[in-house]
Amino acid sequence: MLEGLFEQARLASERRATSVSASQLEQRISALKPPVDAYLALAPAKQIKLIAEIKRRSPSKGFLADIPSAADQALRYQDFGAHAISVLTEESGFGGRLEDLELASKAVEIPLLRKDFISNEYQILEARANGADFVLLILAWLSASKFKELFDFAHSLGLGVLVETHTLEEIDIANQAGARLIGINTRNLETFATDIGLFEKMAGRLNPDAIKVAESAVRDVQDVIRYRSAGADAVLVGEALVKGDPSVLIPEFVSVT
Ligand SMILES: O=C(O)c1ccccc1NCC(=O)[C@H](O)[C@H](O)COP(=O)(O)O
């Protein structure tokens, strides 16, 4: 199923490229302020950092939340203490839109992640042109050589890169590339089952100098404490924040030491 979403995301970017060319995106990019430094915003600190996600739907759960304005949601996340925001721009599985990124970028100052199934340079140009400060590269669907090309391309535009891993082999690829921001997604992308224990088992393999991000499966502050005890510098949280009350949850999460 996810291979299907990955392919759809690639085709959607090819369709968009017929109406907005890469050189038009480059022109838009040249008029923008430099990206906000995601590595600095998420750097290890006494308290854990939070990437709060704007997520309307998911392949595993279906409908999650009605989020009419990505800008308002982003502003709420920033005001309650999030350090960065993940904007899901993939449409069919997650109900996201590219415009959400642009709207959110006009509303907040903290760094914005374009979260999508990125497989080509055009999607990275789109991310930057629409206000992203860093992009997600998921190793599960990229060859090691394509990953490195996209990783270098994103950096050449001044973007940060969150490298998503799920296996020890993928962590080794991220480490070898010199990735500074590495996530372990504890959701199995085939079964959708989540297991915080995976982060606990694998975090020791991450380059000690990398910022370690625990992705998925946070339901409450106990889960954040568990990730932190296993070495997470940051957590990426979607469902709990869109279904719960971010004014209560975010201050709780970011106070975890
Ligand atoms: O969320 C899903 O159902 C999902 C299924 C398959 C691939 C990816 C999926 N989600 C993307 C994510 O990585 C999560 O949105 C993110 O880590 C936040 O997870 P959560 O806090 O558990 O909503």
Image (cartoon, helix red, strand yellow):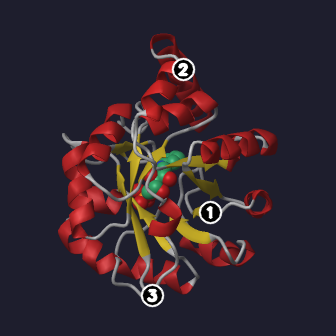
Residue beneath the point at 35% across and 40% down? 101
Mark 1 closeness class: few <14, some 14–19, many ≥20 residues within 10 Å: many
- Left/right of residue 168 with respect to residue 124 in the rendered view: right
Q: Quadrant of the C terminus?
A: bottom left
Of labels 1 and 3, earlier in sequence is 3
Residue 115: horizontal and vertical position, in percent? Answer: 48, 45
Picture quadrant where residue 157 is located: top right
Front one among 192 and 212: 212
Front one among 74 and 203: 74
Residue named by callout 3: 46
Disc 3 on helix, strand or loop? loop
Q: CA distance from mark 3 to mark 2?
A: 43 Å
Residue beneath the point at 59% across and 71% down? 212
Is 161 located above or below residue 94 in the figure?
below
Ligand 1 closer than 8 Å to label 3 CB: no
Residue 159: horizontal and vertical position, in percent? Answer: 54, 48
Q: CA distance from mark 1 to mark 3?
A: 19 Å
Residue named by callout 2: 23
Disc 2 on helix, strand or loop? helix
- Left/right of residue 84 with respect to residue 148 in the rendered view: left
Q: CA distance from mark 1 to mark 2?
A: 30 Å
Residue 225: horizontal and vertical position, in percent? Answer: 44, 83
Mark 3 closeness class: few <14, some 14–19, many ≥20 residues within 10 Å: few
Residue beneath the point at 43% across and 77% down? 224
Q: Quadrant of the N terminus?
A: top right
Residue named by callout 1: 182
Picture quadrant where residue 205 is located: bottom right
Question: Which amino acid is tagged 1?
Answer: Ile
Question: Which amino acid is tagged 3?
Answer: Lys
Is 147 located above or below residue 187 in the figure?
above
Disc 1 on helix, strand or loop? strand
**Residue 230 appears in the picture as rendered:** yes
